Amino acid sequence: MWLKRRKRDNRRLMPIRDQKDPARGVFTRRALLCMAVQAGAMGELARRLYHIQINDGDHYARMAANNRISKRLLAPPRGRIVDRYGIALANNKENWRALLMPEETTDVTGTIERFSTLIPLDERDRNRIAREMRHQRRFVPVMLRDFLSWDEMARIELNAPSLPGVLIDVGTRRVYPEGELLAHIIGYVAPPNESDVAHSTLLALPGMRVGRAGIEQNQDEKLRGTAGSVEMEVNAVGRVISELNREEGVPGEEISLTIDCGLQQRVLNHIGDQTASAVVLDCHNGEVLAMVSTPSFDPSLFDSGVSHAQWIEWTNNQHTPLINKAVAGVYPPGSTFKPAVAMAALESGLISPTDRVFCPGHLDVGGTRFHCWSRWGHGSVDLHLALKYSCDVYFYEIARRIGMDRIAETAHRMGLGVPLDIELPHT
């Protein structure tokens, strides 16, 4: 009985197992759809991966290198100026400074403000930085402060993680070993202005200087040199890890002068505290051996920037210390011009050395009386006596007879009133 009943139960259950499940087909379609989506996504990822690694691999490799390597230009050392014996009259000295690379920070203003809490920036520094930021490209470094002390450099390095784009750099500053002795001849340098940078992008580099007077100005382009470059490895916050490669710039040319520094000092000692000028020439070839103008000034002050008070003191000084009186001063020639008048008179043939002129102490011309230096006059004098006694009336009368055109022509042939071919402004 039990076996028969069990058999019937099996027969009753069998049709249930053989029934077709309607959800089974739905599950299969969903799985296929998911597999298709996954295959499409993997295909798109593979395509993008191929495009990034194969097609644009070099581009992204350069971008990665740029994130790790910082490359910037280096200002070249300015050429030296020496005297005829090789004594340095203008030279360079190391100068530590703080630079900002604008392209290496996303918040330039914030970086400058954090820097100013460590190293104070006055109003002139801030105006200069803002001006350079406006006119220079982001890859050109901007100088925040120069002439840093050891303690100031330590503070900057200690806070480097909070100063992205700020780095310490060593440059050069212009020094003048002889100080005021040759200031008017050598001149001085100063930071370039906007018009200077517009003519030469090299002047946009931190530490570059432009000659503003004397030899520094006249030979400025030769003294500048050619910029170098340096590649540095930096970390995520822009701190320098190591220097990878450096190409030093080409220094400017060395300029050798005919000036004798020792003779210059002796002439200055002879003049003393007088307001005067003196020039010593080699009579054989016309070389300038010494050129002194007093009072003088310290040219090294211009490299770091002259204060307003110092500038007012110089410009209000009645003895004009900034002017080279030997080449820029205008003075009556006095009796030193009489030989030119005498030569012009002899060459004209209108007078002879024996012709005499009476000197009563004055000469009336056109209602104006011109006096001789001798109140009582020199009496009757010829050319020899007129030169011996420097008689003014004799040369007044001779000049009236031959005319100013002949005198001017002779003076020009003697080198008066013509360019001197001296490498100084105003000559």
Image: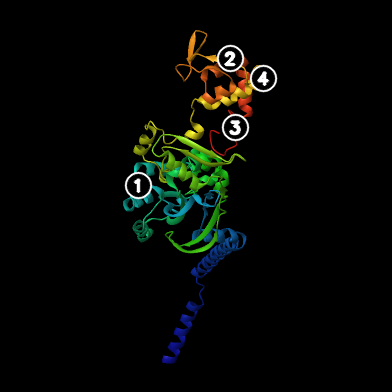
Q: Which comes sooner in the sequence, label 1 or label 3?
A: 1
Q: Amino acid at mark 2?
A: Arg
* Image marks 2 and 1: residues in contact by CB distance under 8 Å: no
Q: Which mark is residue 121?
A: 1
Pair 1/4: label in front: 4
Cα separation, mark 1 vs mark 4, equals 70 Å
Pair 1/3: label in front: 3
Cα separation, mark 4 vs mark 3, equals 25 Å
* Image marks 3 and 2: residues in contact by CB distance under 8 Å: no
Mark 1: few, some, or many residues within 10 Å (few <14, many ≥20)? some
Residue carrying label 3: 419
Q: Amino acid at mark 1?
A: Leu
Residue carrying label 2: 400
- Residue 173, compared with residue 48, is above or below; it is above
Per the image, label 3 sits on a secondary structure element best described as: loop
Q: Is residue 161 left or right of residue 407?
A: left
- Residue 219, compared with residue 317, is above or below; it is below
Q: Which comes sooner in the sequence, label 1 or label 4?
A: 1
Cα separation, mark 3 vs mark 2, equals 28 Å
Residue carrying label 4: 348
Q: Amino acid at mark 3?
A: Pro
- Residue 92, compared with residue 348, is above or below; it is below
